[in-house]
Amino acid sequence: MTHRNLAWLLIVPGLIGLGVAIGYSAPAPDQDYQLVRQFVEVMAEVDANYVRELTPEDRQKFVEDAIGGGLRKLDPHSVYLNEKQLKEFDTETEGSFDGVGILLAQDEKTKRLKISWPFAGGSAYDSGLIANDVIMKVGDTDTTDMTAEQASKLIKGERGTKVTLTIARGDKEFPVTLTRARIAMHPVAGASRRADDPTKWNWFIDPQNKIAVVRVSSFSGLTTKEVEEAMKEIEAAGAKALILDLRDNPGGLLDEATKLSDLFLTEGKIVTTKDRRGGEKTSSARGAGTVFLPAETKPMVVLVNRDSASASEIVAAALQDNNRAVVVGERTYGKGSVQSVFRLAPDQKNAVKLTTQTWWRPSGKNMDKLYAEKQKTDEWGVVPNEEMTVQFTDPEYLRYRTELRKLEYVAGRPDVVGPNPPPPPELPALKGQDGKPLWDEKKPFEDRQMDKALDYLRKKLSGIGAAPRAPLPGAPAHVPA
């Protein structure tokens, strides 16, 4: 068994482990042998006596479900990853995949495959494909009644290879040959995309008061690098205050959380990890490469909510405990554990992700909600600073999540879409148990948490007048290719 400690901090609620591979580097102790033998005997009885004969797929799923269920009994974050899930995990960790850079969906009315939108800067975007283009063929394969998942498998492939899509746009139909490349899933965004170049961001949510916002959606291997690049632009433009928006960020890599915290701190502890053997490691700010200084005259807010977890909580706690930022929003998720990935012999195509450590904030306080419940204490998560809690109602939170995805939307290259680009896809308002919409679609979304952050920073900046804020952008998730 080989061990790759990625210290992954992402929440994976309800994930069922699929796929199995067992390998040993040395003979198992008698007790371990008896446990494995017990499982094998159960499998043999099922094989021999179950009411119907099991297919190879049935047998595989039986074993996989048994392993997955056992791991879930340990804790919610220990899971088994089969080959498919491990590839998806690696993609999330690296923050990129091989493809042409489009989000696919099946049109509900026509059942034809369409491009929801192209990724800014991807092969499809560069080749002039735009939102709502209909894909008639992938190579020589007709896409009639093809699902987005099926099409994605055909379109994705090894970087450097080519794929031809037959596109219908209006009354025209034409082929486009795309070269597959490494497509980055950028974890960092700003206030809005630039109209003249959608591959770039407007960072200022309040241009008049020079208040910038950096939204971080995950902690992949790209996160700190992209935040550093964003801060260079932001500081060069004369930013006076900063909002680091970590809402709905489920976590990611421990190293990235530590590096991002260090980016904004000149000194102080960032996080302490502890293992079951009593081992303890504390990461502290290095004092070199810090951005957005001096802290005394450049105030900062960290925005969090109920689904800010793990790596997000590390950053929020580090900046709060070191008095670098005020935390605004909701109490965070409360996940204070670290997972390590163990790839299994013989082919290392499957893995076990196990909880191996706990982490503790600079103040020494607990972060984990499950641990707090066992200790019968209310000390967990990151709680906003005094008078900085803004709790969304459930409908308000659902509206926020629906709207937020519009920030990713790109119609296409400005020179291709022209002055009237296709609008982002809209979702009807979700309905409550009474069948009525949970919100009025005609009214723009008012982000009370962002408003609170802006109000605080404007006061810190000596009451300079504020420019009006545009409603927060959003859109549904689709299948990348």
Image (cartoon, rainbow, N blue to C red):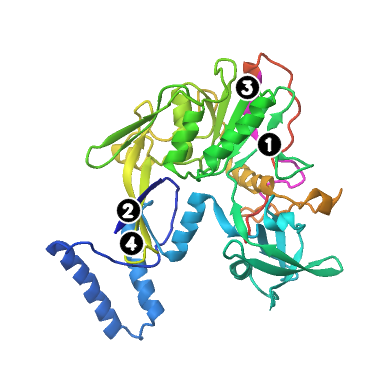
Q: Residue 157 or 30: which is nearer the viewer?
A: 157
**Disc 4 versus disc 2: distance between alpha carbons?**
8 Å
In the rendering, at what x and y percent does residue 277 appear?
Answer: 22, 41
Q: Which residue is mark 3?
A: 457
Q: Nearer the viewer, mark 2 or mark 3?
A: 2
Q: Residue at x 68, y 75 (%)?
A: 145
What's the amino acid at mark 1?
A: Ala
The mark closer to the camera, 1 or 3, is 1
Q: Is 93 rendered above or below residue 381?
A: below
Q: Return the residue at label 4.
A: 344
Q: Amino acid at mark 3?
A: Leu
In the rendered structure, which amino acid carries the disc numbered 4?
A: Leu
Cβ atoms at labels 4 and 2 below 8 Å apart: no
Q: Residues within 10 Å of mark 3 (few under 14, many from 20)?
A: many
Task: Count residues near mark 1 (Cα–Cα under 10 Å), then give few for <14, some for 14-19, many for 20+.
Answer: some
Q: CA distance from mark 2 to mark 3?
A: 45 Å
Q: Earlier in the sequence, mark 2 or mark 3?
A: 2
Report which residue position mark 2 lands on: 3
Q: Which residues are magenta?
A: 437-458
Mark 2: secondary structure: strand
Q: Give the mark nearer the N terminus: 3 vs 4.
A: 4
Numbered tag placed on residue 191 in the rendering:
1
Q: Secondary structure at mark 1?
A: loop
Q: Quadrant of residue 395?
A: top right
The residue at the far front in this view is 160
